[in-house]
Amino acid sequence: MSKSLGVAVIGAGMAGRAHAAAYRVASTLYSPTLPEIRLVSIGDVNPEFGALAAKRFGYERTDSSWQAIAAADDIDVVSVVIANSLHREVVEGLLAAGKHVLCEKPLSDSIEDAYAMAEAAERAESIARVGFTFRRTPGIAYIRQLIQDGTLGEVLHFSGRYWTDYASSPTAPMSWRFKGGAGTGALADVGSHLAYVAEFLCGDIQEISGGRLSTVITERPLPLGAVLGHDHAAVSDTFEPVENDDYAAFSAKFEHGVGGFEVSRVAPGHANSLIFEVFCENGAARFDQRRPAEIELFLKTGEGTQNGYRQVILGPEHPYIGGGLAMDAPSVGFGQNDAFAYQARSFLEEVAGVPEAEALPRCATFAEGIHNMELLGAVAESAAAGGATVTIDSSTTISAKAGS
Ligand SMILES: NC(=O)c1ccc[n+]([C@@H]2O[C@H](COP(=O)([O-])OP(=O)(O)OC[C@H]3O[C@@H](n4cnc5c(N)ncnc54)[C@H](O)[C@@H]3O)[C@@H](O)[C@H]2O)c1
């Protein structure tokens, strides 16, 4: 196992800060089997954002170019957490320099770039993975267990939505999230998570139909300064067109069962609502990201007159919590930031050479990242053809590769 690992995060924005914090915490989850983790650099083209994040999360320095991080001898592991359209250049450069790369989802904003990235990952001797954070959510991982061990049994029907509101105000400033072709908006931003979760639970999607994309706010004002994440910064009176979808819907056919999906960035009242219900032969389960420390479970057992969902509060007997969280007692809660920490831990374990049997389930491969993009591409294709059925022709599957 390596003696120590030097870590850098490229992008000090909304998710970059979550990665930066996660590498700090990763060694403190479970018993100390990781090598020493050195928090080396935060890279951001905006030196102010980089310096603030480095200070806040205790990184040794900040770099204003990804090339400096690629060239640094004291850095082994790099998270790429910048706009989707920038992933390819940076990931390829880092892999060529021998760095281990954890790239944010979606892999890219163009399938051609994603294929090139996967080829670069295949050529590389270092490890390249994609961050689908929600697979680390204990409630979602537990529902998957209940499906796979037969408690819930075979899936009949999945109903999922990922509603957000960050673009619901017409004065929310223009940013990279509103640029790119059909399907690179809400569908790529939050639909990528929802599609991943659906396949994680229900198996591979084979067909998409009923695709619909809609842009309801067609232009946005340019910000007066730099914009981070979903910040509502001060804006100018110059407007630019929105190029991609505010809303997307589609239905899907799994090998067993079907599903309905709806995603939005214009859903006031829902800042971050990944919500799904999965109906199975022996019952059903419900998850709501607004209450991530619980699930609802209905099992068709006992008196029919007492049937109904019950609340299951997550605790040490559920995935990720027992032996993992510092206080691993019942009802201590679990949030999205914790999921980033488990993801960082998993990636560091793989880089450090911790055997799979003793490690957390590995992060998704670039091939799985491509599969996810092909799926979203099929939604855009279906939408362009008035909702026509599109068959998914992908050799890489998420459900087969993802550990529990
Ligand atoms: N897993 C999740 O839950 C999750 C959540 C949010 C975002 N994301 C993903 O993370 C990525 C970043 O999203 P975000 O919301 O953090 O973006 P953001 O706009 O908040 O931050 C991006 C940062 O990158 C910096 N930057 C721009 N160009 C750069 C370059 N060439 N080199 C270095 N830094 C550069 C910007 O100055 C900014 O600080 C996207 O791929 C997004 O899909 C994932």
Image (tube, rainbow, N blue to C red):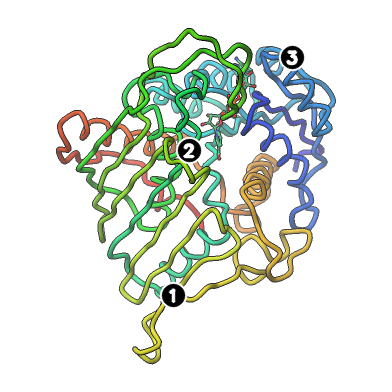
Marks 1 and 3, how far apart at CA: 50 Å
Q: Is mark 3 within 8 Å of ligand 1?
A: no
Which percent across, then down, holds residue 290?
55, 54
Which percent across, then down, holds residue 172?
51, 24
Which residue was labeled with disc 2?
165
The numbered mark, 2 or 3, whose residue comes first in the sequence reads: 3
> Where is the N terminus found, in terms of image quarters?
top right
Q: Nearer the viewer, residue 378 or 115?
A: 378
Task: Identify the amino acid type marked 1.
Answer: Tyr
Which percent across, then down, holds residue 3?
81, 38
Q: CB atoms at circles 2 and 3 under 8 Å apart?
A: no
The numbered mark, 1 or 3, whose residue comes first in the sequence reads: 3
Look at 47% across and 19% down and name the residue there. 85
Residue 23 falls in image quadrant:
top right
Left or right of 72? Residue 125 is left
Q: Nearer the viewer, residue 161 or 61?
A: 161
Look at 47% across and 65% down and name the residue there. 143
Q: Is residue 233 above or below residue 351?
A: above
Which residue was labeled with disc 1?
309
Which residue was labeled with disc 3?
47
Task: Identify the amino acid type marked 3.
Answer: Pro
Marks 1 and 2, how far apart at CA: 28 Å
Q: Nearer the viewer, residue 371 or 242?
A: 242
Helix, strand or loop for disc 2: loop
Q: Residues within 10 Å of mark 3 (few under 14, many from 20)?
A: some
